[in-house]
Amino acid sequence: MAKSTNLIIVPAPGHSHLVSIIEFANILLRRDDRFSISVLVINPPFTAEGLFTKKLSDSHPAISFIDVPRVDPAPLISNPTMAPEAFVSSYIELHKPNVRAAVEKLVIQHEGASTRFVVDMFCTSMLEVARGFGWPGYTFFASSAAFLGLLQFMSARSVFCEDDPDALIPAYARPVPTSVLPTFVFRKDGYDAFAAHGERIRETDGVIINTFADLEPHALRSFGDGFPPLYPIGPVLDLAGANQLASETKKAESERILRWLDEQEEEESVVFLCFGSMGSFNADQVAEIAAGLENSRVKFLWSLRKPPQPGESKWTTSDFKDPNEILPEGFLARTEGRGLICGWAPQAKILAHKSVGGFVTHCGWNSILESIWFGVPTATWPLYAEQQVNAFQMVKDLELAVELKMDYRHGQEALVSAAEVENAVKLLMSVDGHGLEMRKRVKKMSERSRAAVAEGGSSLETIEALISKM
């Protein structure tokens, strides 16, 4: 049957952004078979072209993945002081002619079908391509509604200073300390890049947000009448896709981890530590974490990643061949039986396991949504991007997390002490007092997250409204 609506999606070249926007595409296809979906893949600047696209094509056969020819990032790399957010935004914008050329080919291929354009929050410069063809354009916002509110707040002021007072940002229920704002708000190039995204978002036909009404009611109500329609359709989670793309080595590691969890007799007795695909620490910080875990006497599963080596990007991590390279002497022997060290970890499968009762996380939005979905309480340890303000929202606004740190920044010199790790882990895993009350709130929000995407749920009704609009 001929497809009546051609949907063109332009995701950002980052794994967490790709995962959620592709799962959004799958949701549309499951709800309505009139869509034909093409994803224009902008490859990261330092990876081989086409490899990830092929894996995506193999695992999502109903979606057409098209590699956008990569541009030379040399002009951007020559500016080593450029804020990462400004670099990513500028790198994506350089691809605009190549995206337009790919779209022209799709127009011929899908002649007669109406076309809609959806871009990632980092790709708002591509909305100009949609306008050039006279098509409606939507933004897919992979972060929280509160963070979207921060972007709108930025348009009314200029760069922040670190000694500024707490900010009264309408999307947050409490005043936001300057110490938890993203690093880019203190740098003019990073600030300008995100402020530009915020301005373009206000010109779209709608903002599709990976959140749900019961999680962020205050933030969702904070947007004025002049703002584009909001479509909170979350939680949008790809709970199987990452494992489908895993190598045989990673699959074997996954089996080892799950066997160990199966061996734990007590439910919700293990704390899981995982800091995302780009999260790593130096030896001194690893020693503090190790001491904190050892002193806590709590069972643990720790995804320990190797920091980038000389000449590698600061965001490149890998697995240790032998974790003793960085762990304190004798740590593995002293914690044998109650702790497991791994490298890459199948996060969703671990959070779903009955033995896991707590999650020390970097507070990436996808990780937050996964922890809520599985009803696992979290302790916050943000590293980069908007993770600090995510941690603040989880601890202070939503009261769904324990504060380990809210203002930690990747690469800082000050260490998080073993005592801080120990105390946070004990509080996170406690079964009485504050820990118990928080655990109950998380379980309740887990039920609401699942209800949101069930038949008759708020997010599913929003998806149907979005499909009708498209």
Image: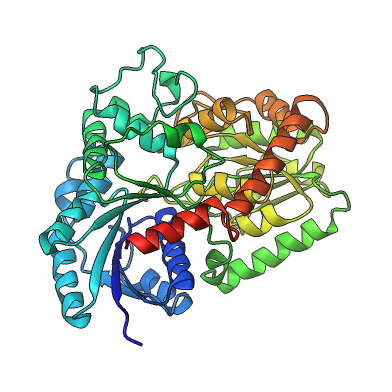
The image shows residue 282 at horizontal and vertical percentages of 52, 37
- Residue 236 can be seen in this image: no
Q: Quadrant of the C terminus?
A: bottom left
Work out whether 465 lies above or below 170: below
- Residue 274 can be seen in this image: yes
What is the total number of numbered labels drawn onto the structure image? 0
| Residue lying at 63% horizontally and 33% vertically, measured from the top left | 401
Q: Quadrant of the N terminus?
A: bottom left
Of residue 232 and residue 436, the one placed in the foreground of this image is 232
Query: Which picture quadrant has residue 220?
Result: top left
Q: For the view shown, which residue lies furthest in the right direction?
A: 265
The coloring applied to the image is rainbow
Query: Which picture quadrant has residue 6?
Result: bottom left
The image shows residue 251 at horizontal and vertical percentages of 62, 69
| Residue lying at 26% horizontally and 64% vertically, measured from the top left | 116
Work out whether 177 lies above or below 94: above
Horizontal relation, residue 286 to residue 443: left or right: left
Of residue 94 and residue 366, the one placed in the foreground of this image is 366
Q: For the view shown, which residue lies furthest in the bottom direction?
A: 1
Horizontal relation, residue 366 to residue 292: left or right: left
Horizontal relation, residue 63 to residue 369: left or right: left
The image shows residue 433 at horizontal and vertical percentages of 80, 25
Work out whether 193 lies above or below 237: above
Of residue 119 and residue 329, the one placed in the foreground of this image is 119
The image shows residue 134 at horizontal and vertical percentages of 14, 61
